[in-house]
């Protein structure tokens, strides 16, 4: 999926976890932010496509491969490699938790600072893990590409997914489902009544709808390296979206798509 849809999905997960916080809405926003960042974070490995990657990072670290070779390859630091693993979903928030306690201005002993940070930040860590894992699942249902899935169980060299149930982008219906969860759940958090049950229910229903939409495309989006095949899959994805959403909403979403400098 595209980075924008990943990010909004992580944000949706954050709204559910935030409902379990007894603190003020401002604190809940930090939990939502954790899920949002996690939704986008796995794709940081796409930095190898940066136009100056070879001259700046490649030369600095003495990489033997060019940026595009790294991105489309199966090195541990390639796209869909280590950053797209369950291992990283757990490691990243744990590093954030430990470093936060380490550099805290609190003058208590280190063990007490780390314990305090765990107590105060555990929901944020949970939101991060949920947002991260959802990103991995969303990438598994996309085309196999040159990776044949994601390196889910790193350090295992096996790749999982690449099902081709949806195209890499143009999944406007799925984006709208995730965005609706964010809007509805934030309203629930502001109302502050039965927020745990309601936000979880909204997320669960949306996940079921998301799952149904993914599995009823009626087309496989796995493709070979032929450019014409790529174009045909792109066209087919848009045709399906127009059928699902109707001409009016589709045109609005396509206009949004064209106005954003991302593969959305």
Image (spheres, helix red, strand yellow):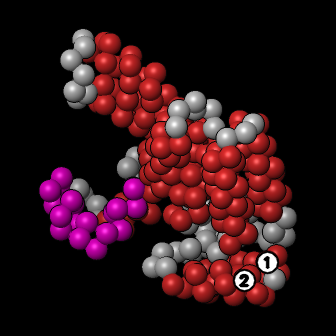
Q: Pointers 1 and 2 in contact (CB under 8 A)? A: yes
Q: Residue at x 29, y 61 (%)?
A: 65
Answer above or below: position of 177 versus 262. above
Answer above or below: position of 44 versus 193. below
Seen from the viewer's position, the closer of residues 183 and 90 is 183
Which comes before the other along the chain, label 1 or label 2? 1
Q: Residue at x 69, y 87 (%)?
A: 251
Question: Which label is found at residue 250?
Answer: 2
Give the percent coordinates (x, y) of residue 31. Answer: 50, 41
Q: Residue at x 77, y 53 (%)?
A: 206
Quadrant in the rendering for residue 99 = top left
Residue position marked by numbered label 1 in the rendering: 245
Q: Quadrant of the N terminus?
A: bottom right
Quadrant in the rendering for residue 63 = bottom left
The local crowd at label 2, few if under 14, some if 14 to 19, many if 20 or more residues have their Cα within 10 Å, is some
Q: What secondary structure predominates along the stretch shown in magenta?
A: helix
Q: Is residue 60 magenta?
A: yes
Q: Residue at x 53, y 43 (%)?
A: 25
First to last magenta residue range: 44-62
Give the percent coordinates (x, y) of residue 174. Answer: 70, 64
């Amino acid at each position: 999926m595209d980075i924008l849809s990943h990010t909004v999905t992580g944000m949706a997960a954050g709204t559910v976890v935030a409902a379990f916080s007894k603190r003020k809405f401002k604190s809940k926003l930090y939990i939502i932010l954790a899920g949002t960042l996690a939704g986008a974070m796995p794709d940081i490995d796409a930095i190898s496509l940066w136009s100056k990657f070879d001259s700046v990072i490649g030369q600095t670290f003495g990489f033997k491969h060019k940026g595009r070779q790294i991105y489309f390859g199966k090195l541990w630091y390639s796209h869909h490699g280590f950053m797209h693993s369950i291992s990283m979903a757990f490691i990243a928030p744990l590093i954030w938790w430990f470093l936060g306690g380490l550099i805290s201005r609190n003058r208590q002993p280190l063990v007490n600072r780390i314990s305090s940070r765990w107590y105060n930040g555990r929901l944020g860590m949970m939101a991060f893990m949920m947002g991260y894992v959802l990103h991995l699942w969303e990438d598994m249902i996309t085309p196999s590409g040159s990776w044949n899935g994601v390196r889910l169980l790193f350090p295992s060299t096996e790749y999982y997914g690449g099902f081709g149930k949806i195209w890499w982008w143009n999944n406007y219906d799925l984006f709208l489902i995730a965005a609706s969860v964010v809007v509805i759940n934030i309203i629930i958090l502001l109302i502050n009544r039965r927020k745990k049950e309601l936000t979880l229910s909204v997320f669960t229903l949306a996940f079921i709808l998301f799952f149904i939409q993914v599995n009823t495309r009626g087309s496989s989006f796995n493709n070979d390296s032929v450019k014409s095949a790529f174009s045909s899959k792109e066209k087919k994805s848009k045709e399906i979206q127009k059928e699902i959403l109707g001409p009016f909403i589709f045109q609005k979403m396509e206009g949004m798509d064209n106005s954003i400098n991302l593969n959305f």
